[in-house]
Image: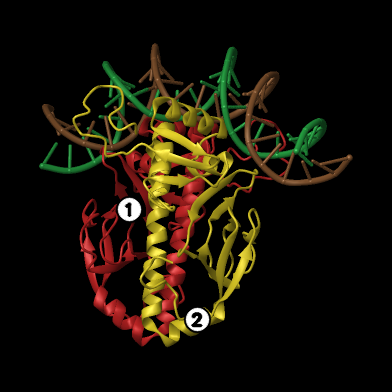
Chain colours: A yellow, B red, C brown, D green
Amino acid sequence: LGDQRRTLEGARFRLMDAPKGEEIFHQGDDAEAIYRVERGCVRLQIDGKDGQREVIAFLFSGEVVCVGLETHWASAYAVTDTIVARISMCSLWELISRDASAARDLLVSADKRLRDVADHGLMLSRFTARARLAWFLQWLSGHDGHRLDAFDLPMTRRDIADFLGIAPETVSRLFRQAVDRGDLRRLSGKRYLLRSREAPPEADKPGHACWT
Amino acid sequence: LGDQRRTLEGARFRLMDAPKGEEIFHQGDDAEAIYRVERGCVRLQIDGKDGQREVIAFLFSGEVVCVGLETHWASAYAVTDTIVARISMCSLWELISRDASAARDLLVSADKRLRDVADHGLMLSRFTARARLAWFLQWLSGHDGHRLDAFDLPMTRRDIADFLGIAPETVSRLFRQAVDRGDLRRLSGKRYLLRSREAPPEADKPGHACWT
DNA sequence: CGGCGGATTGATAAGATTCAAATGGCGTGG
DNA sequence: CCACGCCATTTGAATCTTATCAATCCGCCG
């Protein structure tokens, strides 16, 4: 969907439905398959010991879901109604031994995920709460349908909070601030519009350099 | 060194020295090779725009250094005097097309790294500064020479701070507290000893459940 | 022996969390 | 179709952790 050639094209797979909120697999389960998101949004998360959880990533169409080749070390949930392509491990290994370029594609995909997670870590290390939300919204607005910067926010405040490493209340407050400031507008329901970040560079007036 | 069979055994490589502090490769450079640490300690980091940086990981003997298959999206530095095996990209692709199990090993290694980085993110999301240091010390004490829990701390306070996402001053304060509390002992120079975390479970006396 | 950079320590302030309460939206069932 | 109830979200106030700034100390290397 969109990509010229999808990762793992050529592998045997089975399409599966996952209604909103449903668990696709759970941390600790045997990894019997890997998945590719065909439609919708998937949330990857690690559950800590004290009920705390970290949302590692939100995945959209075309992205490969692979967190553990023997045992899943994270859980996957459908954020919206979702369709995933399930590729069993034996299909996967079969493909790899048959087609070296598939192995390469998979490595590239794994490296991309690693990079994303590392960037996520950079955000978690050093960003202020406000910068975190800005980072998230700008990332998201580049992903979805992105017609004229409008985008959907299918995930809950809690999901966002656990992704950004801040409290849900803080997320809420920052949303209000962003709207009040005019950086964010709510169009309807879950649909939002982010003020273009390529604001004219002559905007030297103090107050917000880029609202990050 | 230690592993039954090393990842990427069978690939052509060249051993290279990297004296303490030296850069092995830099973020943004073309990825001409991947590396395997043979001896010493390597630090992976991402440099942010404002001079801020995130230390993604510290790597020890046997671990594969791969952050970017076309362009390095992170930098690698020698924390101690280090020897790395340099495996050029063409050797790598050649190996993969020749030996599917090598591809599998590499995927497993990439997945392990991803898991580590995701765990790192969990720490960055939710842990208090004190829990971060505990997490770090316990991880490190399981890695190094680990004779009787004694271990080396080759990295600077600044490195640790950037790895844990806290200020160097905070790291310093927490070290003092851990030593005062008796959880950590300095043996000599960079050598430390961590109090066994398997403290008798009958230790119900309030004060420190596990000092995390 | 001197000097330089990393490490420590202290005081202060800012940011975010926490707890608690009120509000709102959404789906369900009447 | 509307009313109800539940759960997510919002809002407020107090608190606490940690960052920041600045000064000093220490260890190491030349």
Q: Position of residue B193 (x, y in %)?
A: 48, 45
Residue A104 appears anywhere in the view: yes
Q: Nearer the viewer, residue B198 or B86?
A: B86
Q: Mark 1 belongs to which subunit?
A: B
The mark found on residue B111 in the picture is none
**What's the residue at 28%, 66% (across, down)?**
B84
Figure check: B98 above or below A197:
below
Determine whether the residue tagged by mark 2 lies in a helix, strand or loop.
Answer: helix
Question: Closer to the camera, B88 or B20?
Answer: B88
Which residue is at 26% across, 22% downward? A206
Q: Residue B131, how many percent across, how many down?
A: 53, 39
| Mark 2–mark 1 distance (CA, rounded to whole Å) | 32 Å
Counting every numbered tag in the picture gives: 2
Q: Residues within 10 Å of mark 2 (few under 14, many from 20)?
A: some
Can I make out residue B164 in this image?
no
Rendered position, B44 above or below B161:
below
Please state which of residues B201 and B66 is positioned toward the viewer in this rendering: B66
Q: Which mark is residue B43?
A: 1
In which quarter of the view is residue A74 placed? bottom right
Between disc 2 and disc 1, the foreground one is: 2
Residue A130: x and y in percent read 42, 32
Q: Residue at x 54, y 47 (%)?
A: A154
Which of the chains bears the disc numbered 2? A
Amino acid type, callout 1: Arg
The answer to the question of whether label 2 and label 1 lie on touching residues, with beta carbons closer than 8 A, is: no
x and y, in percent, of residue A50 in the image: 65, 43
Q: Which residue is mark 2?
A: A93
Mark 1: secondary structure: strand
Q: Quadrant of the N terminus of chain B?
A: bottom left
